[in-house]
Image (cartoon, helix red, strand yellow):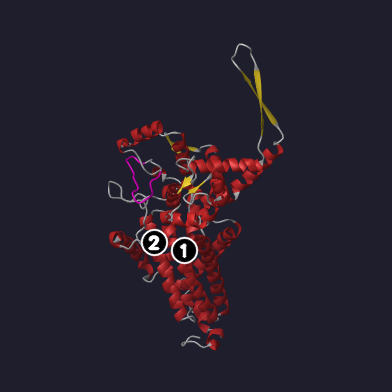
Amino acid sequence: MFPYLSMGDLLSPTPDYWKFLGTASLYGREWQNMVLCVASIFCNLFVLSHHLTERPHPKFLIHWRRKVMIRVHVACGGFEMLFAAIAFFTARPLFALLTSLWCIGHVITSLYMLSGVFGIRLIMYPAYLYTILLHLVHGILLSLEPRNAEKLVNTFLTLQIYVWVRVVYVFIDHFNVLTSCQYTVSVILAGMIVGPAVNILGNAGNLLVLCFIGLWNMARDVLPPCCSHMYPSLDEDGDYSFDKTELNRLNVRFKVSQRAKTQTYDNLPAGPGAEDPSARSPRMTSVYMRRSECGARQSRQSVFFDNVADQSSHLQVREEKPYSIPRMKSRVTRMRHTRMQSTRLSVVAESETGTGDVSTMQATLADGDDLEKAGAREVFESLCQDPSVGLTKADMSLLLSIWGLPYQEVDYVFGERAAGLADPEVFSFEEFYKLLEPIWHYAQEMAEYYDAERAKPMNLHVKGKQTVRGD
């Protein structure tokens, strides 16, 4: 099987695993790493249960490649942790070798999904790439020496960076601090928690991460397109706005013509990103002009992206709450309206004609399915630059970019569903409702959650003569 180990060696318990903690100092590196492993396993109980019970973000369901990759990714991570635990407690190198193989699978899927990472891209892309490569290095080292307990622990802990991202995100969300860059801060702090235990340079590992991010940004202009994110093009100041902005729920509002200065995305298909050059003005003047000049359709589109698409993220806690909490609210609302579907409303309109005629209009409340479809239509109109035309590739490209995906994948979205489209370049509402259910379903739940959050009373803390806003 492998020249350096026979099958007997792989199946025989190795003393090195049992000596790993027995010969270590009580306050040494080995025990500290084991404490971190135990804490990570505890946190994994919640993270894995979430993966098993909740649907993925719709960007992972937008076409079959993403669907397959997210499932393989989660499976590889789960089996890697399972076999690592079995290997450590049984002391059999065979399970350590299987751990390294699942690690390779996790790395491959991670590299594919790297193209859709959230957060501030100029930090997140190299930071995640560094983590993936570090995971790969430890997996290879473990495959070369599966009898080494320390290499097994390092491989296991490197994978736990992903778990601690979720933990830190919950921490930030609970205390409501640093929320403008919540995902980016979560990733950086997660790396700082696990990094010193697994980095090749040990305690100097975080410095290596910083240097890697810096060199990546310095070399971005010469990187191949697959490495330097191909997102909306340079603005007038030479900045990639999408790369330097936290793609999260709070501060991406510029993307639907809401920047202080003109934004035109030359490498996006002609769509809602274009803006009138004459509208260049300071921030408040720009906001006033935008509100006065945009029609109802553009307003709906802006509201949608502010309140729904901005709140989308990659396996984040707040962004995924709509899959659980608001869904309960949605069911209650649907049941309430279903019970009332036989109720009739009489709307009396007195005409101002001299005869004083009275006309009565009867309206029957829609049942749950009609309400759901009406909500889907609202999402559809919010996504479309022109709802009468339909959801075009330009509209879908913008949504994919906001969700952190390469906008070129719009061809996958349309191509995969071409058989069900009357026009292969446009989704009509009925086609959108039937073929893109994850998008409108997610958008409805996000809108419900957003409305519920806005309805909460604002907490104010009075400190001396200063009033500090709590949220």
Q: What percent of the width, then of the height, locates residue 27?
A: 46, 71
Residue 60: x percent and y percent?
51, 57
Q: Residue at x 54, y 81 (%)?
A: 94
Q: Residues within 10 Å of mark 1 (few under 14, many from 20)?
A: many
Tag 2: amino acid: Ala
* Residue 246 locus on image (x, y percent): 40, 50
* Residue lying at 53% horizontally and 87% vertically, measured from the top left: 9
Q: Position of residue 35 (x, y in %)?
A: 51, 67
Q: Is residue 190 above or below residue 284?
A: below
Q: Residue under label 2, please give it.
A: 127
Q: Is residue 265 magenta?
A: yes
Q: Which mark is residue 295?
A: none
Instruction: Depth check: give the residue in front, 265 or 32.
Output: 265
Residue span colored magenta: 259-271
Q: Secondary structure at mark 1?
A: helix
Query: Which residue is at the front of the view, 61 or 144?
Result: 61
Few, some or many residues within 10 Å of mark 2 (<14, 14–19, 20+): many
Give the labeled residue for mark 1: 161
The quarter of the picture where residue 419 lies is: bottom right
Marks counted in the figure total: 2
Please report the residue visible at 66 percent of the width from the left and 42 percent of the height from the top: 368
